[in-house]
């Protein structure tokens, strides 16, 4: 049963109740949140990028020659960081190449012995394209960088010297402010005169090493 609208003021006056007037333009209280999420923050230890400009590193890996198979390569690098993103690098590498595949066809092969020493010298420029962090453990992050690198150099083997172009990419992860692990992929491009025919070759190198900053 509905109470007539005219009786509302009379009943409120008799009972001493003040009517509550709700205006449509007044803001209504927001609904209380039922579930309050709690996010536990972790204390993450981050290795800072070193402020030293010079670096010295050693590396070892595989040198895959287009014509003479794959072999162990090792060497050293010396770098200078011009800015936070741009750096220059000089590299010396050494390995072995073999003409064993040709000796199965040609008596005596191509080289004086089946294996000869290959050496190369490169001067390159690099650019950090993806600086970031790598989580080693739950609460430990290491500064890292992915970079592109390219340059010119010289490759020597079998008493011949070849002008070479190198290009590739690499990454480094800092274990501390003064030392980092480094991995690289480089393509050494140069022309050789093989059996009277000059040919441009692609020679891939995959290496890893350690670098010290000072």
Image: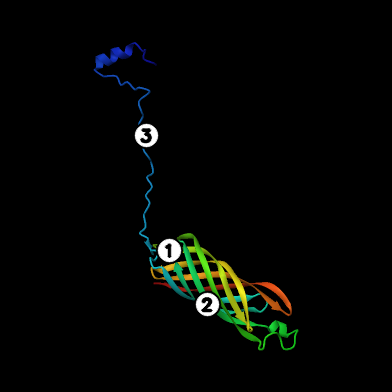
Sequence-first disc among 3 and 1: 3
Q: Which residue does the numbered mark 3 point to in the structure image?
A: 30
Locate residue 99 relative to residue 33 in the image: left or right.
Answer: right
Q: Is residue 6 visible?
A: yes
> Callout 3: few (<14), some (14-19), or many (20+) C-alpha neighbours within 10 Å?
few
Please state the horizontal and vertical placement of residue 33, each as a whole percent of the image.
38, 40
Corner quadrant of residue 167: bottom right
> In the displayed structure, would residue 115 be above or below residue 175?
below
Please state the horizontal and vertical placement of residue 58, each as a whole percent of the image.
48, 76
In the rendered image, the quadrant that contains the N terminus is top left
What separation in Å lies between label 1 and label 2 (alpha carbons)?
Answer: 26 Å
Please state the horizontal and vertical placement of residue 207, each as a whole percent of the image.
54, 73
Say which mark, if any, is on residue 92.
2
Q: Is residue 135 visible?
A: no
- Residue 27 or 5: which is nearer the viewer? 27
- Residue 91 or 14: which is nearer the viewer? 91
Please state the horizontal and vertical placement of residue 63, each as a whole percent of the image.
59, 76
Label 3: element kind: loop
- Residue 56 or 70: which is nearer the viewer? 56
The image shows a total of numbered marks equal to 3
């Amino acid at each position: 049963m509905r109470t007539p609208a005219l009786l509302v003021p009379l009943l409120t006056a008799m009972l001493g109740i003040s009517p509550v007037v709700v205006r449509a333009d007044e803001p209504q209280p927001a609904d209380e949140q039922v579930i309050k999420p709690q996010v536990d923050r972790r204390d993450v230890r981050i290795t800072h990028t070193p402020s030293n400009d010079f670096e010295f590193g050693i590396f070892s890996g595989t040198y895959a020659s287009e014509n003479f198979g794959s072999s162990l390569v090792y060497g050293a690098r010396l770098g200078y960081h011009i800015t936070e993103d741009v750096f220059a690098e000089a590299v010396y590498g050494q390995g072995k190449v073999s003409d064993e595949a040709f000796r199965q066809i040609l008596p005596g092969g191509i080289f004086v012995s089946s294996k000869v020493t290959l050496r190369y010298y490169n001067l390159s420029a690099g650019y950090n394209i993806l600086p970031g962090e790598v989580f080693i453990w739950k609460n430990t992050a290491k500064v890292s960088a992915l970079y592109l690198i390219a340059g010119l150099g010289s490759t020597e083997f079998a008493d011949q010297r070849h002008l070479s172009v190198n290009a590739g990419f690499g990454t480094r992860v800092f274990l501390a402010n003064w030392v980092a692990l480094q991995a690289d992929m480089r393509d050494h491009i140069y022309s050789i005169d093989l059996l009277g025919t000059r040919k441009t070759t692609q020679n891939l190198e995959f290496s890893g090493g350690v670098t010290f900053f000072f």
